Amino acid sequence: MQMAEVGHVSHRNRQHAGEVVVVEVENTEVSEVGELRRERAVEDVVGEVEEAERRAREIAIAHWWVLINCEEVKYWKESHLYFPEVDGDLEYHNMTFANYFRTWMDMIKSDDNPNWSHELLLLAMQPQRARVYPTCTVNGVKFVSEERDSRRRTQNSGVMALGHGLDYYGVLHSVVELVYAEGMKVHLFKCRWFDTGAQSMKMDQYGNLSVNTATSAYEDDPFVFATLVKQMFYLDDLAKGDAWKIANIVHPRNIYRAATLGVTIPGPEADAIRDEDSTFIDVDPNEETDDDSDDELRHRLPDINSDTEEDSSDDSDYEP
């Protein structure tokens, strides 16, 4: 007989002695509980390590995506592909280019090479850290992650990226901010892209494009530059039903180009307005709008300084 706090208790063998209850433990070792706790602790540590490794891999993939899609890196990428040791081997090229690129930038930074720049040097040094946000405002247009958008009465998660002969439709998963040396930042949208096959995208006789939003594709290539995305609004396709949605490009209210106002702007200012790369990006992890008001039943793009609500769980900051 022993006093027990844990274990399987035999109710048949309880004995009362005043205020003391004596319990007999049947075939249960207290050490088993300690062993179970140790196993759970190990599982927790393993889970944390695996999550850290997954995030590090994702940062590496995002950085690689930036390199292969940056026009300024094109010269170096093509040069490396035809190195004797690479000899056009795409797999080996993909595995080794990032390290070669960093070595090159360090070597030629004092050689006055016309293809070298300080920004490329920072880019070659790889991200020092990355942050993930649920919302992002690009040139006054607000994008919201699919997960957060699902809790709202407005819709700001639809995205479309122009491709070479094929446009890609999807929804925003998260905003990834890669932070390089000296605070240089690159903003990417991580998206869930819909399947672009003929069975998942259909055009009707009126020119309306309907997409099956229950499909997914390009899981290994989810990123796109935040500045190259157009916002989409998906309407229910009543003819096809289920997950089929009619895709509509959003034309933000209260945002105008000079040409639409009949204003002529001379000089470099005009080039800046026409330049797609001249963009303003603002990320706010805590930004939320009150979607319960009656005037928010329609789609809208809220102001940056709208009502806020703490939601730190949607914002993460991790080291590679």
Image: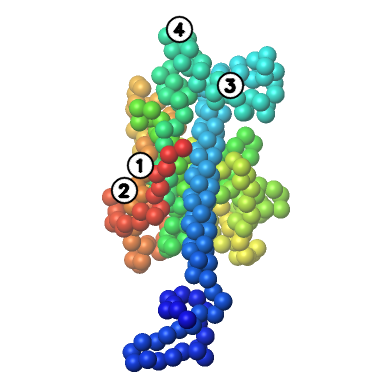
- Label 3 packing within 10 angstroms: few (<14), some (14-19), many (20+): many
On the image, the x and y values in percent for residue 260 come to 39, 38
Which residue does the numbered mark 1 point to in the structure image?
282
Q: Amino acid at mark 3?
A: Lys
Q: Amino acid at mark 1?
A: Asp
Indicate which disc residue 77 carries.
3
SS type, badge 3: helix
Disc 1, disc 4: CB below 8 Å? no
Q: Amino acid at mark 2?
A: Ile
SS type, badge 2: loop
Q: Residue at x 36, y 44 (%)?
A: 283
Disc 1, disc 2: CB below 8 Å? yes
- Label 2 packing within 10 angstroms: few (<14), some (14-19), many (20+): some
Which residue does the numbered mark 2 point to in the structure image?
304
Name the front one of labels 2 and 4.
4
What is the spatial separation of the Cα atoms under label 1 and label 2, in whole angstroms?
8 Å
- Label 4 packing within 10 angstroms: few (<14), some (14-19), many (20+): few
